[in-house]
Amino acid sequence: MSAVTRARALLGVRFRWQGRDGDGLDCVGLAALALGLRGVPGGYRLRGGDAAVAAAWLDARLMRVAAWAAGDLLLVRSGPGQLHCAIWTGDGMIHADAGLGRVVERPGMPPWPVIGAWRQA
């Protein structure tokens, strides 16, 4: 099953900060389930995320890519000092939207600056 298929199966799951299962997900939990990542970090703050630390964690587990493909994990800066993860679908992204309170799919390019993209090796 592809990462996009796994992420789409989670559409509508409620947003829950630090959520890691079907009872609620945040962006890290969604990425972990879609990509099959284990040992994802917890206990982090919503703001003040260090992009270099996040990128190094991803570099140790996934392959960094320059050109995105469906199923890639995007690390974005969704606000001042705030990092966010999304799964690229090829023509949009799936992410855990705190404002909407659930996992959603949105068409088009990410509305935030993309820090990097990673895929399963």
Image (tube, rainbow, N blue to C red):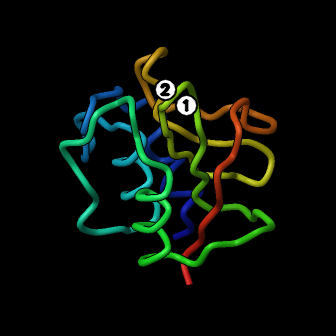
- Residue found at the very far top of the displayed protein: 99
Q: Residues within 10 Å of mark 2 (few under 14, many from 20)?
A: some
Whether pointer 2 and pointer 1 mark residues with C-beta atoms closer than 8 Å, the reply is yes
**Secondary element at image label 1:** strand
Q: Closest to the observer: 24 or 49?
A: 49
Which residue matches tag 2?
97
In the picture, the quarter occupied by the C terminus is bottom right
Of the residues shown, which amino acid type is indicated by label 1? Answer: Val
Is 55 left or right of 18, judged from the image as shown?
Answer: right
Amino acid type indicated by mark 2 = Asp
Callout 1 environment at 10 Å: few (<14), some (14 to 19), or many (20+)? some
Foreground mark, 2 or 1? 2
Where is residue 95 shown, x and y percent of the image? 53, 38
Q: Is residue 52 left or right of residue 78?
A: left
Q: Residue at x 43, y 76 (%)?
A: 61
Q: Position of residue 65 (x, y in %)?
A: 70, 72
- Left or right: residue 36 versus residue 114 is left
Residue 27 in the image, given as x and y percentages of width and height: 42, 41
Q: Say which residue label 1 marks.
A: 104
Q: Note whether 118 is above or below 18 in the view shown.
A: below
Q: Residue at x 43, y 57 (%)?
A: 54
Q: Is residue 71 above or below residue 91?
A: below
Query: In what element is the residue under mark 2?
Result: strand
- Vertical order, 92 against 74 (above or below): above
